[in-house]
Amino acid sequence: MYNNDTICAPATANGYAAISIIRISGENAIEICKKIFVSKNSNFTDFKSHRIYFGNIQNGNDIIDEVLVSIFKAPHSYTGENSVEISCHGSSYILQKILELLINKGARPAKPGEFTMRAFLNGKIDLSQAEAVADLISSNSKASHALALSQMRGGFSNIIKVLRQELVNFASLIELELDFGEEDVEFADRNALNILLSKLKSEIQKLINSFAMGNVIKHGIPVAIIGKPNVGKSTLLNSLLNEEKAIVSEIPGTTRDSIEDILNINGITFRFIDTAGLRQSDDEIENIGIERTYQKISQASIILYVVDICKTSVKEIKASLNDFEQQIENKDKKFIIIANKTDLLFQTPQHIRDLLSLEIIFISAKRKENINLITDSLLKSVSINENSNNTVISNIRHYEALSKTLESISQIENGLNNNIPGDLIAIDLKTALLHLGEISGEVTNDEILGNIFANFCIGK
């Protein structure tokens, strides 16, 4: 997958902008740049590392643009290779002409993620840090940004490195025993190994358990808005988003499919889903929408159950909640009851005391009254502690590798308890090390690298 040729690509997005950046990396990056760059400094003799030079990009005597050229000599660059970044004006014509010149002088267009892949292959970062780069680029909230930044800086990598090294130490002792098998010696203390395995299982289980929260931080917390037709679900969505996202009508069954949008609240991303009203209907299309509503309920972490305060009794609310609980397998879902249309109340409902015994928020979505109480309740429902020192994983590949590692460690424990031979224990140890190594990239293959870096943007 990798060779020493020189690659180039725009590092900034296409479109109208003041500045664009072109990135070049490879053994001949600086030499290729010299062929098209003319410095404005009369004393210019040669490029020095970590300097910025002002001049023209020229095709012979034809000036393409005035640019700034940043030089990074190997190994002190992002990729670990000779690297150049050309800051030019943001014209698509200028960008294209400079790329054509670079290619004509010996560079080739970079593939998606090729710069970061070279950084990994040259030992600048490990594989989990490389994946964190992509997460950092796509982060859209304070929480997802903090998580990606922590992983990119090696917080997760360091934990995996320690866990793997402890297993390596014991595996080497087991291997040593096998070398002296005829002498019946025991270098690896079985009690100490059991203690270590127990510790490793605990640490790995914590990481596995953190995936649910990491996935929520990375992709946003799904919140389903459900209820009967005409209780104000679409109006509530519009009020939360502060825009007319959903069609609002007095005709029951207007929303026939789910409508989704995101909202960032105090650095946490929530994905709101407005669903079709729940009722018996003879309309085939509406029934499909209702079926999808139940699917969205099963996928959501938080349910906003909207009721019309003027028309709904406590008995009906409790019956509906009981019905939802029977249909939903995950009992950890958070239900928040939203009593809407308080603006239409002319007197206090007789059942107000019974309503207050439930976790309920009284609002007028039409007047946007008490909407802040909903956002406050949503934040309280999410136990994200940004100041926590606990490492959180958010990558499904890491989750699967850790799960397989845990299985292997359990097999090692069972083997020790059943006094199986050392050569079989060694096999399970190697398997555990293999799965841990897949996370950091100490054990990898072209297929894994291709799958990871194919999802990167060009120029990164």
Image (tube, rainbow, N blue to C red):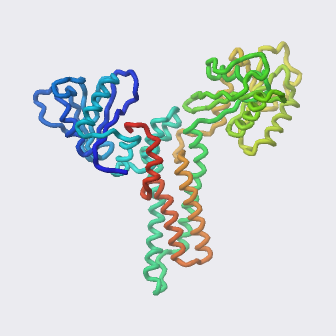
Closer to the camera in the image, 152 or 87: 87
- Left or right? Give the position of 141 relative to 4: right
Image point (82%, 15%), residue name: 345
- 92 left or right of 67? right
Residue 278 at x, y percent in the picture: 79, 30
Quarter of the image where the C terminus is located: top left
Q: Residue at x 76, y 28 (%)?
A: 285
Task: Residue 378: name its quadrant.
Answer: top right
Q: What residue is rendered at 86% in x and 30% in y? A: 316
Can you name the residue that lies furthest to the bottom here? 183
Quarter where residue 353 is shown: top right
- Report x, y in % for residue 208: 58, 52
Tell me residue 14's x, y (percent).
40, 27
Q: Residue furthest top?
A: 346
| Count of all numbered marks drawn on residues in the image | 0
Indicate the quadrant where residue 23 lies.
Answer: top left
188 versus 391 height, above or below = below
The image shows residue 211 at horizontal and vertical percentages of: 58, 47
* Left/right of residue 44 with respect to residue 447 in the rendered view: left
Instruction: Identify which residue is drawn at 62% across, 31% down.
Output: 271
